[in-house]
Image (cartoon, rainbow, N blue to C red):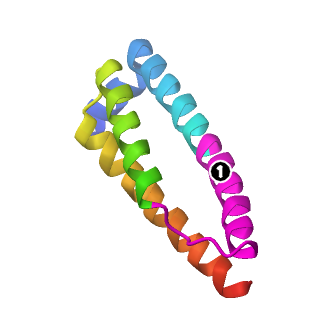
Amino acid sequence: MTQETQSHADDDPTLAAYRKSIDNIDAAVVHMLAERFRITQAVGEYKARVTLPPADPEREKEQIARLRRLAEESELDPEFSEKFLRFIIDEVIRHHERARGKA
C-alpha cells in the first residue's frame, strides 16, 4: 500500500468504522479464549487429580460436529471452524498432559 493509499484509508470514516468493529470483535475473541482456557485448566487439574486421561476423543468428536453445525448455521466455513477448534483442543490437551505430569 502506498503512503497516499494509506492516508486515504485513514481518512475514510466507513473503513475506520469497520476496522473499529473488527478491533472490538478481536478483543472479545481474546477475552473469550482466555476465559475458556481458565476453565479448561481447571478441568485438566481435576482430570489429573482423579486420574482421567488428558484427552477424550469421543467428546472431541461431538464438539467438532456441534461446532461444524453451528458454523453452517452461521454461514461460516465449517472446515475453518473445525481447524480452529482442533487447534484449541490440541492446546488444551497439551495443558492437560502438563497438569497430569504435576499431579
Residue 48 magenta-drawn? yes
Q: Position of residue 77 (x, y in %)?
A: 25, 32
Q: Residue at x 43, y 20 (%)?
A: 18
Q: Magenta span: helix, strand or loop, mainly?
A: helix
10 lies above or below 86: above
Q: Position of residue 20 (x, y in %)?
A: 52, 25
The amino acid sitting under disc 1 is Ala
Q: Residue at x 68, y 47 (%)?
A: 35
Label 1 packing within 10 angstroms: few (<14), some (14-19), many (20+): few
Q: How many marks?
A: 1
Question: Seen in the image, is 4 located left or right of residue 32?
Answer: left
Q: Position of residue 57 (x, y in %)?
A: 41, 60
Q: Residue at x 74, y 84 (%)?
A: 103
10 or 28: nearer the viewer:
28
59 or 11: nearer the viewer:
59
Work out whether residue 60 can be spotted.
Answer: yes
Q: Residue at x 72, y 85 (%)?
A: 102
Question: Seen in the image, is 25 located left or right of residue 44?
Answer: left
Q: Position of residue 86 (x, y in %)?
A: 37, 55
Disc 1 target residue: 34
Residue 73 magenta-drawn? no
Question: Seen in the image, is 51 located left or right of residue 18?
Answer: right
Question: Seen in the image, is 23 located left or right of residue 65?
Answer: right
35 or 2: nearer the viewer:
35
14 lies above or below 76: above
Q: Which residues are magenta?
A: 31-56
